[in-house]
Image (spheres, rainbow, N blue to C red):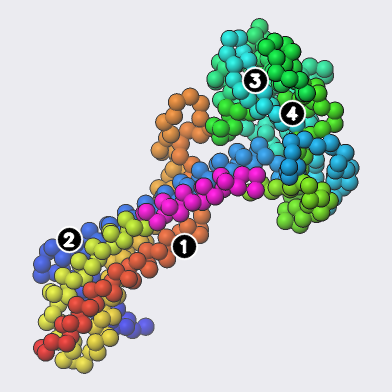
Amino acid sequence: MQTPFPLYIARRYLFAKKSHHAINIITLVSVIGVMVGTMALVVVLSVFNGFEKLILSQFNAFNPDMEVSLREGKTFSSTDIPLEELQQMPGVAQVGEVLEEAALLTYRDRQHLVRMRGVSSAYRDITGIDTLLIEGEYLLEDGATDFFVMGHGVAHILGAGIHDFLNPLTIYVPRRGRSISLQPADAFNASTHYASGTFGMQSEYDMEYVLVPLRLARRLLNHGDEVSSLAIRLEPQANPSRVQRDLEAMAGPQFVVKNRFQQQELLYKIMRSEKWVIFFILTFILIIATFNVVGSLTMLVIEKQGDIHTLRSLGASRKTIRRVFLLEGMMISLAGAVGGIALGGLICWLQMRFGLVGIQAEGNFIIDSYPVAVQTWDFILVAVTVFSIGLVANILPLRKISEKLEKPG
């Protein structure tokens, strides 16, 4: 198949030795600039994907598929929503009760305000909280004995460990219906227990939450069958939107049903916003790098004035000559884009395989190196972005060509 004339000339101009060595250098710099900018886009987007996937996996292991709570108010009776009927709903695999309240946790001479989350025995299977364990085991009940599972941040602040059987932890909860008293014993219900394990995820949760058995939470809060929310695990093949609508219809307008996204809606929006902000910043840098191509093409047009008039004398149209230099610029951009995508993909693979770039953080961290998650959509987005920037940047020097074509040879 014969190569089109504009592409043939553009290819010869790209690889042919220029009379001015500076043009070759500028062309090489243009390719490298586009390649580095493209590589940065691929790597940064993949790292953001990695952090997003990691953080969401942590929250998905802490939060249920669906959560039912009061639209206004703190607690409601578990009989307000028939649990047996709820358990039999299509798409619902398991239902658990949750009772949450602020509390004070003490260890030796230290104390820390926490969120006490009392959970039923089904909570482990509903959320996968045991996958977040850093130390110990997920054990809240052993016969008549109750245990705590606390966030790693809580344990760090209190200096508490799970192997200290001489110094248990004590949790204090304000007594229901009692007025403020100068005697702590009159104002609080307290209970002393040992910790069986610690979990780690996002720092705000690590330093805030302590999991306790539901029976202990109800005893401390003087609640009978009241709960703060219902945690629901869905069947793997269930349609979340359909199940959510069915739950809303069953619960009624006084209750709100939240899926995983709605439970952490602010976090989702922040992560997406940060990703797009970084994308546009790097795109702006890529635009600046791409304008090296403008300088390269402009110098090439100046050097090839004689060729331009020769081609015009041989019958080449202005459109054909413009296309020659447009293809020349697009090949420079394409070379940089392909090289950048390939290099970025290689760096991402090396990071995923070997964890070359580690994370320097004080204390225990859930990962040792920067997480990377490669998505095909990001590669397509980067390729389209680089192509669009290159097309716009390469059109600008063509105005100079038009001026030269207007002059008599």
Measured in 3D between alpha carbons, the distance from the residue under mark 1 to the one under mark 4, in whole angstroms, is: 46 Å
Camera-side residue: 381 or 314? 381
Residue that carries the numbered disc 3 in the rendered image: 104
Measured in 3D between alpha carbons, the distance from the residue under mark 3 to the one under mark 2, in whole angstroms, is: 68 Å
What residue lies at 76% left-to-right and 20% top-to-bottom? 178
Residue 208 position by quadrant:
top right
Measured in 3D between alpha carbons, the distance from the residue under mark 1 to the one under mark 3, in whole angstroms, is: 51 Å
Magenta-drawn segment: 262-282
The amino acid pointed to by label 2 is Ile
Task: Please say whether residue 192 is visible from this viewpoint.
Answer: no
Q: Is residue 340 above or below residue 301?
A: above
Residue that carries the numbered disc 2 in the rendered image: 25
Q: Nearer the viewer, mark 3 or mark 4?
A: 3
Question: What x and y, as percent, mark residue 206?
Answer: 58, 29
Label 3 with label 4: CB-CB less than 8 Å:
no
The amino acid pointed to by label 4 is Gly
Residue that carries the numbered disc 1 in the rendered image: 380
Task: Please say whether residue 377 is visible from this viewpoint.
Answer: yes
Label 2 with label 1: CB-CB less than 8 Å:
no
Q: Nearer the viewer, mark 4 or mark 2?
A: 4
SS label for mark 1: helix
Residue that carries the numbered disc 4 in the rendered image: 118
- Crowding at dot 2, Cα within 10 Å, few <14 / some 14-19 / many 20+, comes out as few
